[in-house]
């Protein structure tokens, strides 16, 4: 969600590469936990909750899987290749398990929820299967394994939001953090497995969100990204019903914590994003001028089959409103699926023309991957060949890359406020940070440090990155 690159399938694969915990938390005599996260930012955020729960229960974390007592993979089921990656990764642990039979291997997240007991049958190395709502039960599940059993909990909850758990920040740059504001999804986009793996939508208590954001600020963080599958349908009510908070109001309350705390959010659903949200972005300088607005397709016929509940005109109307309220410079990014069931060349051309119309800053683009059990898998035929899907995807990516380059060129010569996140990946003489529109900016190190806000004059760009000098 937060990567600036324009992602091909392969790039996305690269983004999905496992990230391990680098924090060494706890003492030598404790049991050691190694956790890898795959897929969307929600999973990375959930791994921080899991680590917190297990830390409370006497576990320390390690970044070396061969010294771990427990190995957990927090998995993604959104496309078939995400699942294959997890299955391949499990093979890497086989020799370890043979050497140390007491090693516990667990799978968490969406793939665990989708496959349930099948996972235990198909992957003999797996001892524990835990769905996204059962992480509090992990210590019990590990105990069951110690007693010689396999353990599984895939119950989905209507209430669980882990609101009271303080996530242990993993792989943190100490500047930016993700804060989950809701769980699950009540939309039934026909291609999507999420409603089946993450359950019903529920919003987290506003006060626990505000406290988490305040704690982050107190610990030196400068940016929070509010996370949910569909943040615009955030809705919280106090137990007595006297106080209700919608997403625009939540955004405002987080923005008011401190003007130095930047606020981002993801993901917005085109059917739900309100004008109130747009005016809140405009009102507060620290709410970033950037919206991730997945389109999925530019064809109304395909959008209907996808059950997205908006059509092309509706989507365009929302984009027009964003431009009217927030201006041409507001960053907009997309998710697009190429080659959905029955998609014709004409539908595909409509997707390309939508990209031309909106002029997205960047996007995440995928070939359609049929997921078992989804409405599309049950009712529609996955009738576009892989070659055709890849051809269309390549055209979409090429067009997006061209437009990203043009959009970035608009910034050359302007001054951008950048929050520095750390050293540039390519050279320690340079720093990297993000501007308001979530674009990566590279600048010479000078005397600046991560966590600083600096005004940077943009001098050049690629399709994915801006380069500049401190003013
Ligand atoms: N809730 C977000 C929304 O509705 O925009 C998206 C969540 S999903 C984790 C991220 C993206 O994965 C989707 O926007 C969609 O483009 C893509 N995706 C989901 N299911 C897919 C499938 N079966 N095949 C290909 N891409 C898929
Ligand atoms: Fe999936 Fe649609 Fe929910 Fe997004 S809004 S998670 S695409 S069902």
Image (tube, helix red, strand yellow):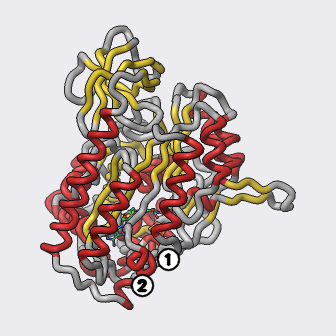
The picture places residue 218, in percent across and down from the top left corner, at 60, 27
Disc 1, SS:
loop
On screen, 251 above or below 255? Answer: below
On screen, 437 above or below 445? Answer: below
Q: Quadrant of the C terminus?
A: top left
Q: Are marks 1 and 2 in contact (CB under 8 Å)?
A: yes
Which residue sits furthest bottom?
379
The picture places residue 263, in percent across and down from the top left corner, at 56, 38
Q: Dot 1: within a 10 Å radius of its alpha carbon, few (fewer than 14), some, or many (20 or more) residues?
A: some
* Side of 210 relative to 455 (left or right): right
Instruction: Report the front residue among 150 and 174.
Output: 174
* Side of 433 relative to 240 (left or right): left
Q: Which mark is residue 188?
A: 1
Q: Residue at x 38, y 43 (%)?
A: 61
Query: On the image, which quarter does residue 438 sit in?
Result: top left
The picture places residue 454, in percent across and down from the top left corner, at 44, 18
Instruction: Report whether the residue tagged 2 is closer than 8 Å to ligand 2.
Output: no
Residue under label 2: 375
Q: Is residue 435 visible?
A: yes
């Amino acid at each position: 969600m937060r990567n600036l690159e324009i992602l091909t399938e392969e790039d996305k694969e690269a983004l999905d590469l496992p990230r391990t915990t680098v924090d060494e938390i706890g003492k030598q005599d404790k049991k050691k936990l190694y956790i890898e996260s795959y897929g969307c930012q929600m999973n990375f955020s959930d791994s921080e909750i899991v680590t917190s729960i297990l830390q409370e229960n006497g576990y320390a974390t390690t970044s070396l899987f061969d010294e771990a007592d427990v190995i957990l993979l927090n998995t993604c089921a959104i496309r078939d290749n995400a699942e294959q990656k997890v299955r391949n990764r499990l093979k890497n642990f086989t020799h370890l398990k043979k050497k140390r039979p007491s090693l516990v291997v667990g799978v968490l997240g969406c793939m665990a929820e989708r496959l349930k007991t099948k996972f235990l049958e198909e992957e003999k190395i797996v001892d524990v299967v835990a769905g996204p709502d059962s992480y509090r039960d992990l210590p019990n599940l590990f105990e069951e394994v110690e007693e010689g059993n396999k353990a599984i909990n895939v119950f989905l909850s209507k209430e669980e939001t882990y609101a009271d758990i303080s996530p242990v920040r993993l792989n943190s740059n100490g500047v930016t953090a993700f804060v989950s504001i809701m769980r699950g999804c009540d939309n039934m986009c026909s291609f999507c497995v999420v409603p089946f793996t993450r359950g019903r939508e529920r919003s987290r208590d506003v006060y626990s969100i505000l406290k988490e954001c305040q704690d982050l600020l107190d610990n030196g963080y400068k940016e929070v990204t509010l996370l949910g599958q569909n943040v615009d349908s955030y809705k919280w009510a106090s137990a007595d019903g006297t106080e209700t908070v919608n997403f625009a109001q939540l955004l405002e309350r987080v923005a008011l914590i401190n003007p130095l705390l930047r606020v981002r959010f993801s993901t917005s659903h085109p059917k739900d994003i309100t004008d109130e949200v747009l005016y809140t972005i405009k009102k507060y300088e620290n709410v970033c001028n950037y919206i991730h607005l997945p389109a999925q397709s530019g064809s109304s016929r395909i959008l209907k089959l996808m059950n997205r509940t908006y059509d092309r005109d509706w989507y365009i109307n929302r984009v027009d409103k964003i431009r009217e309220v927030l201006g041409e410079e507001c960053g907009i990014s997309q998710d697009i699926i190429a080659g959905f069931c029955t998609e014709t060349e004409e539908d595909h051309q409509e997707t390309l023309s939508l990209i031309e119309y909106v002029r997205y800053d960047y996007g995440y683009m995928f070939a359609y991957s049929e997921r078992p059990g989804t409405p599309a898998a049950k009712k529609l035929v996955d009738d576009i060949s892989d070659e055709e899907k890849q051809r269309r995807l390549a055209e979409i990516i090429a067009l997006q890359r061209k437009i990203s380059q043009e959009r970035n060129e608009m910034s050359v010569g302007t001054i951008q406020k950048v929050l520095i996140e750390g050293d540039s990946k390519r050279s320690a003489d340079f720093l990297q940070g993000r501007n308001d529109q979530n674009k990566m900016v590279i600048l010479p190190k000078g005397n600046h440090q991560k966590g600083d806000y600096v005004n940077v004059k943009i001098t050049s760009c690629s399709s994915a990155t801006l380069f500049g000098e401190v003013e």
